[in-house]
């Protein structure tokens, strides 16, 4: 049954054109094809065109190739050719270098040798790419420049805030609080701030947007505060023990093994919370598993000055005798001791790169030391102050900040900056606070210096102090909650064990091969060994079960057996040493002796005869 067209709708005289319709070709090369039709397809008038003669494009002729010389030649890739056209300056390659190349010469197996060479190629490629992408770092570090007849030390925070953009001016603020004196910490990415007052006040917030995470009173005295590996957890050293809280103020854990703690520090790559208490104990707590990996007496008394070196994870502790001792969680003795001052120390700081150590003492001196060369007795820089410095910190760009009571000073370069005692070298900036300064820290990736006083907190603008370009894979100030979780998982998988904390982290890549003299001495000791003394304690038996004569006889039997075993082991070792030396003298490896012929050899199976072809 066919449907009739509705009334009032005239049929079109011409069919509607579709997107595949085209005009009929004039030339004879193209042929019209009959339209295909399905049962469910309507009738339409159109032309399907099929190309019969395809025009082939002529390929460009290849240039004549000269015959290659014999031997294996590596073909240059496009990347290598581009690298030759655009060479990278050696300064940039040294800046992003990851250390000396590990030679695959000493690797025994072929598989691991190829793996090592492949790894070195990847590292070399990563260094080149990092050096090339420095062009994309559009942010540059700014700095104050004074006009003629002026010095930057005369500029005040109000003048700086009036002459910067609104976003930067909002970073200059002050908080007046009543539960001081306060301790403060920034997170690794510099986005969040943690404040802890001596009289129990704790506050955590995003200081850029001024969004408060939590605020409460612990109802007991607080000695120090410290962020953990993420901004959702922090540790507080309270009167008796150390407590863990989340960013909502909920108590997560109480660590009673860390008692009477004065100072806290966190090693982000090792997941270790370092603590120093009033009794002189240094402790390292692994927050990923909740175990103490190190806890021993330093014999330094009350620990009040403590910082860790970011490059190798070594803990630097300042003492009352002017000595800085460096500690590792797996070594009970200090790795190194450095006599910095003739008087007691008052402050200590390590720069973020882990290359320089800045110390201050009661002798009103500030000294800068090279951590990579502790053999050198003289400091890299030394300048005198009017008063002893009670707080120190170094920024990412190498600026030095110090406080003397209520007076603050910042220097553009810690190696060339002078003190207030030297009028020729004035500081970069000066600031007078309204109360005694109890803590100061530079904010990472921001030109901000945070100062905690007895009456609250101040955020000061220090142009040129922070690193302008951040690595989002390392520390991202704008990370989301999903990125934070991913970063936490990756950090746990890449956690460095505490056994690798040493003064020189590059020693791990080397092989501790004994010298020739050590081998000779060890072999000589084999010929002069004495049997060790054996202290045997017999089991106590009841009266009448065994006499003293039997016990003495059994003890002598055991001693004789142990002595015979020791003599046999030494004899075998001597034989092996003599055999090795005789083989080397003959110029060939010692061959196994052929067994003597026996009467029973005729019963052994004869070797199969070779078939003639």
Image: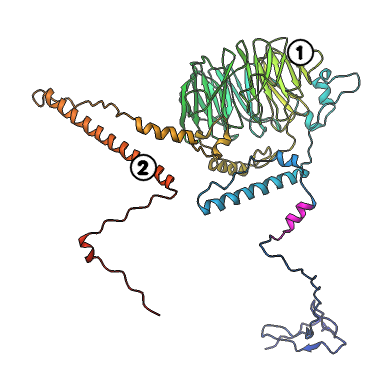
Mark 1 or 2, closer to the camera? 2
Residue 14 position within the rendered picture, expressed as x and y whole percent measured from the top left? 84, 84
3D distance between C-alphas at marks 1 and 2: 71 Å
Image quadrant containing the N terminus: bottom right
Q: Is residue 83 magenta?
A: yes
Residue 156's tag is none
Is there CB contact under 8 Å for labels 1 and 2? Answer: no
Image quadrant containing the C terminus: bottom left
Q: Secondary structure at mark 1?
A: loop
The magenta-colored residue range is 74-84
Q: Mark 1 vs mark 2: which is more N-terminal?
A: 1
Residue 208 position within the rendered picture, expressed as x and y whole percent measured from the top left? 71, 32
Residue 576's tag is 2
Q: Secondary structure at mark 2?
A: helix
Disc 1: which residue:
420
Q: In the rendered image, is residue 177 in sight?
A: no
Above or below, 127 against 600 in this view is: above
């Amino acid at each position: 049954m066919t449907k009739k067209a509705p009334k009032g709708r005239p049929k079109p005289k011409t069919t509607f054109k579709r997107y595949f319709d085209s005009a009929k070709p004039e030339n004879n090369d193209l042929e019209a094809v009959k339209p295909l039709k399905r049962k469910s397809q309507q009738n339409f008038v159109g032309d399907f065109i099929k190309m019969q003669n395809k025009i082939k494009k002529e390929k460009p002729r290849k240039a004549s190739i000269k015959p290659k010389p014999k031997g294996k030649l590596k073909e240059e890739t496009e990347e290598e050719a581009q690298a030759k056209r655009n060479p990278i300056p050696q300064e940039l390659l040294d800046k992003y270098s990851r250390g000396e190349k590990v030679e695959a010469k000493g690797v025994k197996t072929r598989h691991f040798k190829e793996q090592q060479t492949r790894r070195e190629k990847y590292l070399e490629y990563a260094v080149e790419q990092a050096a090339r992408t420095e062009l994309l770092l559009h942010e540059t570090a700014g700095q104050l420049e004074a006009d003629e007849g002026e010095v930057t030390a005369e500029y005040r925070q109000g003048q700086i805030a009036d002459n910067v953009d609104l976003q930067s001016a909002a970073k200059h603020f002050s908080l007046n609080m009543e539960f001081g004196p306060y301790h403060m910490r920034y997170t690794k990415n510099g986005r969040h701030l943690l404040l802890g007052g001596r009289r129990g006040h704790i506050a955590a917030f995003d200081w850029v947007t001024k969004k408060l995470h939590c605020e409460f009173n612990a109802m007991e005295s607080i000695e120090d505060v410290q962020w953990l590996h993420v901004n959702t957890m922090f540790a507080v050293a309270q009167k008796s023990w150390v407590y863990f809280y989340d960013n909502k103020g909920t108590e997560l854990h109480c660590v009673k093994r860390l008692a009477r703690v004065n100072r806290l520090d966190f090693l982000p790559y090792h997941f270790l919370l370092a603590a120093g208490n009033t009794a002189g104990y240094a402790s390292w707590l692994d927050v990923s598993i909740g175990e103490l990996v190190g806890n021993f007496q330093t014999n330094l008394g009350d620990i009040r000055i403590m910082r860790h070196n970011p490059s190798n994870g070594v803990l630097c502790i300042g003492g009352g005798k002017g000595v800085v001792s460096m500690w590792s969680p797996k070594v009970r003795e200090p790795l190194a001791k450095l006599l910095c001052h003739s008087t007691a120390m008052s402050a200590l700081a390590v720069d973020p790169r882990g290359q320089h150590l800045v110390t201050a003492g009661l002798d009103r001196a500030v000294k800068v030391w090279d951590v990579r060369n502790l053999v050198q007795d003289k400091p890299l820089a030394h300048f005198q102050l009017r008063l002893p410095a009670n707080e120190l910190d170094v920024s990412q760009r190498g600026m030095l900040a110090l406080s003397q009571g209520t007076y603050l000073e910042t220097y553009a370069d810690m190696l060339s900056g002078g003190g207030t005692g030297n009028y020729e070298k004035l500081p970069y900036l000066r600031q007078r606070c309204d109360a005694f300064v109890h803590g100061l820290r530079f904010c990472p990736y921001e030109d901000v210096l945070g100062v905690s006083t007895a009456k609250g907190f101040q955020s000061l603008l220090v142009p040129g102090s922070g690193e302008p370009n951040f690595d989002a894979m390392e520390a991202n100030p704008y990370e989301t909650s999903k990125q934070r979780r991913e970063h936490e998982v990756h950090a746990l998988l890449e956690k460095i064990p505490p056994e690798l904390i040493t003064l020189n982290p590059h020693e791990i890549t080397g092989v501790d091969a004994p010298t020739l003299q050590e081998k000779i001495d060890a072999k000589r000791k084999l010929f002069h060994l004495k049997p060790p003394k054996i202290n045997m304690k017999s089991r106590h038996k009841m009266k009448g079960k065994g006499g003293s004569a039997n016990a003495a006889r059994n003890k002598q039997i055991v001693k004789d057996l142990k002595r015979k075993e020791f003599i046999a082991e030494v004899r075998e070792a001597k034989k092996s040493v003599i055999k090795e030396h005789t083989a080397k003298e003959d110029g060939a490896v010692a061959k196994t002796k052929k067994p003597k012929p026996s009467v029973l050899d005729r019963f052994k199976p004869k070797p199969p005869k070779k078939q003639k072809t």
